[in-house]
Image (cartoon, rainbow, N blue to C red):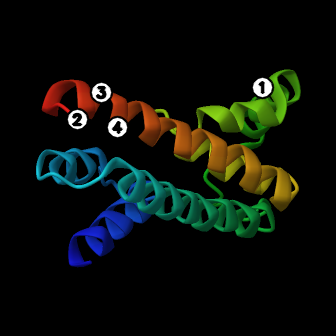
Amino acid sequence: MIALSGLFLAALLAASPLPFQSEVVFLGLMAAGWELFPLVLVASVGNTLGSCVTYALGRWLADQREHRWFPLRPAQMARAEGWWARWGVWLLLLSWAPMGDLIVALSGVLRVPFALFLLLVAIAKTGRYLVLGGLGAAVFGG
């Protein structure tokens, strides 16, 4: 149980603004003989919840746009909004990729409805760990 708790924490932190990698923990547990289903389930839930933290941070930042310390200048924000207008919420399916946390935070800033956010991010995060699990099974056998 401690191992799964560690995976949950690693996955949660990996989807937060903190720099962290959950893949090493996930693959390490696979190599140690853990079954794929609980690993995918725990990592997906943890990673999705971590994205919810990042989304909430984006929602909070949306109310701070007028402050000089807001991370995006007006021109950068206009570009981000144009980028979002072109690709829309479907960008959230890339929330698993490098720089996906920026997409997640931007979805909060732009106030994407939470239910839609949660659905797309959960699909993306679960898909990521299913693929990682498939790769791990090919390497470690099983």
Q: Position of residue 106 (x, y in %)?
A: 70, 47
Q: Position of residue 120 (x, y in %)?
A: 72, 44
Who's the residue at 60% across and 32% down the image? 94
Which quadrant does the C terminus fall into? top left
Who's the residue at 83% across and 51% down the image? 116
The tag on residue 142 is 2
Snapshot quadrant of residue 76: top right
Against 3, residue 131 (above or below) is above
Q: Nearer the viewer, mark 1 or mark 2?
A: 2
Q: Residue furthest left?
A: 32
How far apart marks 4 and 3 lie (CA) works out to 5 Å
Q: Earlier in the sequence, mark 4 or mark 2?
A: 4
Q: Are marks 1 and 2 in contact (CB under 8 Å)?
A: no
How far apart marks 1 and 2 lie (CA) works out to 42 Å
Q: Nearer the viewer, mark 4 or mark 2?
A: 2
The tag on residue 83 is 1
Snapshot quadrant of residue 2: bottom left
How far apart marks 4 and 2 lie (CA) works out to 10 Å
Dot 3 amino acid type: Leu
Q: Are marks 4 and 3 in contact (CB under 8 Å)?
A: yes
Dot 2 amino acid type: Gly
The tag on residue 133 is 4
Mark 1 surroundings within 10 Å by alpha-carbon count, few (fewer than 14), some (14 through 19), many (20 or more)? few
The residue where tag 3 is placed is: 135
How far apart marks 3 and 1 lie (CA) works out to 32 Å
Q: Earlier in the sequence, mark 2 or mark 3?
A: 3
Mark 4 surroundings within 10 Å by alpha-carbon count, few (fewer than 14), some (14 through 19), many (20 or more)? many
Dot 1 amino acid type: Trp
Q: Secondary structure at mark 3?
A: helix
Q: Position of residue 24 (x, y in %)?
A: 21, 47
